[in-house]
Image (spheres, grey):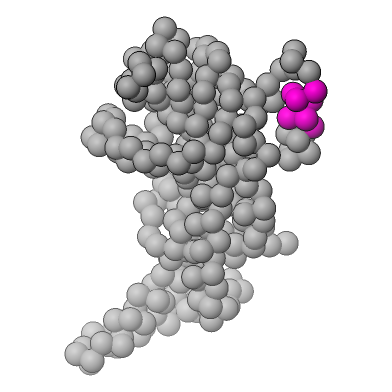
Amino acid sequence: MILAIAMALSAGTAGFAAEPATVDFNDLADPAARAFVDPYLEMGPERLNDLRTVVRLGARLAEAELSPEDRQRLEVRRSDAEAALAVSGFDIAALLAQRWTVAQKRREAQIATNPLLEGAAVRLEGYLIPAGTGPDGRGIGYLVPVVGMCSHIPAPPPNELVRLYFEPERGTGSIYLPVSVTGTLRAEASDETIHLLDGMVRMQSLWRLDADTLVAEGPVPTARNTIVAQDPLEALPAEEINQTRSSSIGARKK
């Protein structure tokens, strides 16, 4: 995929008639920042919750003021979680030793942009979230890979959220309209809070796309989900835990 993008971008600079390179949201992140082993993604939600239990109850047991009954109850629960992890072949000490290193690498994977796409002419399909107009009268919106993102589903990482600028006559007031956009993509940080279906939502984007064309079309194929908590032991809603199992962040341990 990286080679295909590079070849398409190279072709785009070779002649004025060349078509924009077709990219998807997974291409927007720097692949080098994602090339790390994330052992927590291999655990599955049940064993990851066991590890959280070990950490949480360990902190509780370190408290001085616990009744003998409470202490025994917590020790039994912690032992059960440790046994479940051991049976599944997980090394608790090794996992905990990597916790903050993995957290930092996850953060980098969410904010590093693909240098091959800086200033590139691209074609990108996604769902449009209108966000009003700018001081110059141009329409502003956000492109997201999955319908419902930012309102019913958490926002994508900043390097997969695209702030879109377009001419007013090309815009629409419809939320989550599937669109195909061509234009020039640039790395540009923005941070805005807008009103969506469920209230005010913070939109942190690291990409700007100035549209040459904006066409309503669809449906748009669902992109791979890359939403994961930066801290591997941060609790997530059940549906989001399931999504992280197919996350593309991190290389899978063979």
When the figure is inspected, residue 57 is found, relative to residue 65, above or below; the finding is above
Q: Residue furthest front?
A: 136
- Viewer-side residue, 52 vs 174: 174
- Viewer-side residue, 169 vs 147: 169
Magenta range: 7-14
When the figure is inspected, residue 250 is found, relative to residue 170, above or below; the finding is below
- Image coordinates of residue 249 in percent, x first then y, are 59, 52
Visible residue check, residue 8: no
Q: Residue at x 35, y 75 (%)?
A: 56
Q: Is residue 30 left or right of residue 240?
A: right
In the rendered image, which quarter contains the N terminus?
top right
- Image coordinates of residue 146 in percent, x first then y, are 48, 32
Q: Quadrant of residue 101?
A: bottom right
Q: Residue at x 38, y 55 (%)?
A: 236
- Image coordinates of residue 96 in percent, x first then y, are 50, 76
Q: Residue at x 42, y 7 (%)?
A: 169
- Image coordinates of residue 140 in percent, x first then y, are 39, 23
When the figure is inspected, residue 233 is found, relative to residue 208, above or below; the finding is below
Q: Is 44 covered by the magenta stretch?
A: no
In the rendered image, which quarter contains the C terminus?
bottom right
When the figure is inspected, residue 227 is found, relative to residue 212, above or below; the finding is below
Q: Residue at x 53, y 81 (%)?
A: 93
